[in-house]
Image (tube, grey):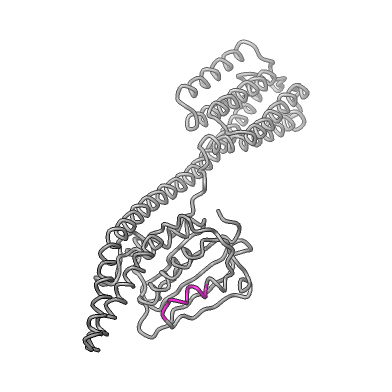
Amino acid sequence: MAVRPTSEPISPARINFGWLIRLRFATVAGQALTIGAVRWGMDLDIPIGPLYALVGLAFLSNLACIGYARAGTPQDWWLLAAMAFDVLTFSGLLYLTGGPENPFSFLYLVPIAIAAITLRPAWTWMLVLLSLASSAVLFARHRPLPMGGGHAGHMVLHLRGMWVAFGVASAFIVYFLLRVRRALAARDQELDASRNLAARQERLASLATLAAGAAHELATPLSTIAIVAKDLEREVAAAGNRTTVEDVRLMRQEVERCRQILARMRTDAGDQVGERFVRVSVRELVSDCLAESAPGIDVALDEAVAGGSATLPRRAFVQALRGLLDNARQASPPGAPVSLRVSADGARRLVFQVADRGRGIAPEILGRVGEPFFTTKPTGKGMGLGIFLARAIVERLGGELSIGSAPGTGTTATVSLPVGESP
């Protein structure tokens, strides 16, 4: 359910340029094999030296493309330059092997088809004009193929070559387009995940602002009530009314509790500005979570993580994990235990799993779990912010929160957290 976006989505130009480099390597290999098959398999006297020189030049140009891609960010014009160079080298190969008589001459369509989906329209038309001009030159000047066997034999061989060329062109075009489409689809998913994360952070900032405003507005009247209650407690105590004294004392305790709740509201709303990242052991994290949670939680620590630790804002993460435990306890039947399991996912991530024994969540509702102010609890039992705030805190730490459930099987909240240095 959780999608972890990358820090910087890959640009379309880098995706396209990467797959063009792969395609060019395949093209070079195919050209080298074809030249060898024609020369020695069909025993045609073609100029091996110049042909392999052109293939080697295309190979070296592709190595240069790899170097440029690693040194900087690929631009759209890089694709145009690479495909224009391919058109010229391909024209050179055709010039030495029969020109328009060569059955592979219609492979000009391969770079044009690729350009149609990767380049700007104007640049695509430029490549079309270059291909037309190169093909026109070949009609005027080219080196004829040394064909024997008469016109009939020549036509049979030409038709067979056209069939092979059709298969090669189709394979290259379909493979490249499908791979680029998949890569672009993956990039779109990353962008959607990034937009969703930004939207959640904006809502979180709004909640933090609301919490800070409420704490500021309510602090003064609560202080006034506390002072008045203290004076009232003294007067009632002097009058000797013990029952009323206990009631006033309870009122003062509840006022102090409200002040403590207001003091935690900003942290609960995801405002951890100022809280430092510290190295905390897994046992201490679990102990902090259980300190203020209700009893009835089964804890299981895998041996691989029992002595481990993580670098994080301690109070914020404990608050997030405690919220998940509270949700699981409320979803479970009375007396049913809630389980907390801590394990390792490789050497770099901790996994916290909170499982309840409740009725589970229907699929149509599961997709909305984690939205702010969406809750399945009865009115007055919750505001629908627990999972939303927990996910926001976990994602700020570079982790993931996912919810898995099915009707009748309970619900499991899984937190995957990096254990390296602070992000």
Residue 381 in the image: above or below residue 47: below
The residue at the far front in this view is 238
Q: Nearer the viewer, residue 415 or 284?
A: 284
Which residue corresponds to the image point at 23% horizontal and 81% vertical from the top-left?
Answer: 235
Which residue corresponds to the image point at 40% horizontal and 84% vertical from the top-left?
Answer: 336
Is the N terminus in the top left, top right, bottom left or bottom right quadrant?
bottom left
Residue 312 place in picture, x, y as percent: 54, 61
Position of 187 compared to 30: left or right? left
Quarter of image, res 349: bottom right
Residue 301 in the image: above or below residue 423: below
Residue 133 place in picture, x, y as percent: 55, 15
Residue 174 in the image: above or below residue 291: above
Position of 82 compared to 324: left or right? right
Position of 50 compared to 128: left or right? right
Residue 392 in the image: above or below residue 88: below
Position of 26 compared to 384: left or right? right
Looking at the magenta stretch, what is its main secondary structure? helix
Q: Is residue 268 magenta?
A: no
Quarter of image, res 52: top right
Query: How many circles with numbers are drawn on the protein?
Result: 0
Q: State the extent of the magenta-drawn residues as a range.
A: 286-294
Residue 416 place in picture, x, y as percent: 52, 63
Quarter of image, res 218: bottom left
Q: Nearer the viewer, residue 404 or 350?
A: 350
Which residue corresponds to the image point at 54% horizontal and 67% vertical from the top-left?
Answer: 351
